[in-house]
Image (cartoon, grey):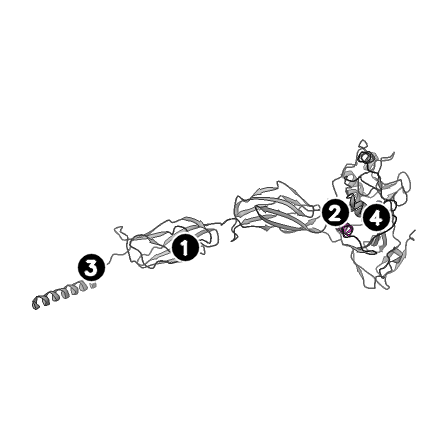
Amino acid sequence: MASVMLSFNVRLALGAALLALAACAKDATAPIKPASVSAANNGANGTVGTVLATAPTFTVLDPSGNAMANVSVAVVVSGGGGSIVGAPTRTSAGATSVGTWTLGNTAGMNSLTVTVNGLAALLTITATGMPDVASKITVNTGGTQSAFGGAALALPISFKVADRFNNGITDQAVTFAIVAGGGSLSGPATATTGAGGLVSAPEWTLGKSTGTQQLGATSGAMAAVASANVSSDFSVDVRFFGAAMDPTIQAAFTAAAARIQGLVTGDLQNFSVNQAPLELAGCGVTGIAALPIGEQIDDIRIYAQAKVIDGVGLVLGSAGPCYTRDGGSASGLTLIAVMNFDVADLQNLQTSNRLNSVILHEMLHAVGVGTLWSSKAQVSGANSPNSAFIGAHAVAGCLFHGGVAANQCGSGTVPVETIGGIGTRDVHWRENPSATGIGFRTELMTGFLSPAGIANPLSRITIGSLGDIGYVVNLLSADSYAVPSTLAASLSTIRDAQGLGEFQLNETVFQPIASIDASGRITPLRQRP
Ligand SMILES: [Zn+2]
C-alpha cells in the first residue's frame, strides 16, 4: 500500500515538471491574448453634474470572439471633467461596468478611455452632458453702454438663460420690459432663447433724462436687469434754500434737472469764485452765505425754494438767471439762477399731476429759454405783434414738428408770445393763433399750462433755441410734438369741456443782473424789479 502511494506522487511531480518545460518553450499552449474590446451604452445622454443612469460596459474578446475575464484594465476620465468611482482594474466574466460615472458640469461631450493590458488599441466611451433645469437669467453682452437721452443703444443687449452651472438653455421664453428711465423698446417684447441659451432684447431707446436706465428680462420666475447710461457732460446743480421743501416737490426739481442734463449735453468750463466771495442776496437768495473764494460751479447752479406767497392762484413764482458767464466759449450763458415758488401753487399743481411740467418749464427759463434770447440777439420785433425767434436751430425744430406753413415757421422764424406782461411776452412761444402766426399751444414753453391730463411736450423748438444761444444740445431728447394746424380745436375748448380753467403761468421771468468773468470781475446788467 505504501509503495503504490509513492508511485502516484512521483507521477504528479513529473507532470508538473513537463508543464513547466512547455511554458518555457512558448509553444502553442501559451495564454491567449486579448484581440479586441468593445463597449455597450456608449454615447448615452445624462444631466450635467449627475451620475449617468446606466453605466456603460465594455467587453474584452479573445481572437475567437470569447469574452475574457480577469484581464488587467484601466478606466480613466479623458474628457468633460467628470469623475468615476469604482473603476474596474480587471475584467469581469462578461461585460464589465466602467463604474459610477458622474458627468462634468459643462454641457457637451464627456469621455472615458479604457486601456486593456496586451491590447494596443484604446477604447473611448462617450456620454453627452445635457443642461440641468433653467435656474437663472443673466445679462450676457451689451450691458454697459451709453447713449444720449432719447437715442438707441448702438449694440443689442443679450441675455442668457442657464442652469446652475451656467450652461445655456435653448427654447426658453423671455419677456423684456423697461424697468427704469422711461426708455422704449422697438420690437416684440417676447423672444425665445437660441443657441447657448442666448436671446437679444429689442433695440433699446434710452429715456430722455440722465439717471438710472434699466431694461428687465424675465423667464418664468427668473429675472435680470441690464443698465445703461444717458450721456451728458452738462451738470445742473440744484440747491434748495428757505423753508424745508416737501420731498415730492423736491423730486420735481431733481427730475427737471435730470431732463435738462439729457437735452443740454456739452460741458461748460468750470467757474471758480475768484478775488472776493460771491454774494447771492442780490439774486433774492436769503439765508445762504456768500460763495467763498475757490467755490467751483459746474456747470450751472440753481437756487430753489418753495415759500408762502399768496395761496393758490395769483402769483406762481419767479425764475431766471441771476449771474451769467462773461468771456470764454460759454459767455452769456447762465452761471447762477434762482427759482422761487408759491408752495400752495406747487401743491395744487401736484394734485393735478402738472407739477413736473411747471418745474421743468421754470428751470428751462433758469437755463436760458426766453431769459437769454434777447441778450443773445435771437429775437426780432420784441414787444411788437411780430415778435419772433430767429435762431436757425429753433426754426429747424419747428419745421421738424410740422410747422411748415408761412404763418408758422415756414417764413424762417418762430412766432413768440405777444400778449401778457413782461413775464410772458417775448419769452415764450406763441400760445394762440393770431393774424401773424399759429400758436404752439401745448408746447411746454408757451406761457400757458395745458389742462390736466394733456401733456406739455418739450419740443425741438425749445431745445433748438438753447442751441441757438450757445449750448450743445441733444435734439433726440425732444418729446413727440406736432405744431397744430389752424383748424385744430383750441385748448380753451378742451379746457371748457373738462370744466378746467385756463392756467396762465403767472410767473416773473428774471433776466440776469450781472455777468462774471474768469477773474471774478462782476459787470452789472440790470437791477431786479
Ligand atoms: Zn414761462
Which residue is at the front of the view, 122 or 94?
Answer: 94
Cα distance, mark 3 to mark 4?
116 Å
Q: Quadrant of ligand 1?
A: top right
Give the residue at mark 3: 27
Q: Can you tell which quarter of the image residue 409 is in?
A: top right
Q: Give the structural element (helix, strand or loop) at label 1.
A: strand
Cα distance, mark 4 to mark 2?
34 Å
Badge 4 vs badge 2, beta-carbon distance below 8 Å: no
Residue drawn at (74%, 49%), measured in percent from left and top?
A: 262
Asked whether residue 246 is drawn in magenta, I would say: yes
Camera-near label (4 vs 2) is 4
* Horizontal relation, residue 427 to residue 142: left or right: right
Give the residue at mark 2: 474
Cα distance, mark 1 to mark 2?
61 Å
Question: Magenta residues, as a range?
Answer: 244-260
Residue placed furthest toward the top: 487
Give the class, few, some or many, for how many residues have Cα within 10 Å of label 4's Cα (few <14, many ≥20).
Answer: some
Give the residue at mark 1: 101
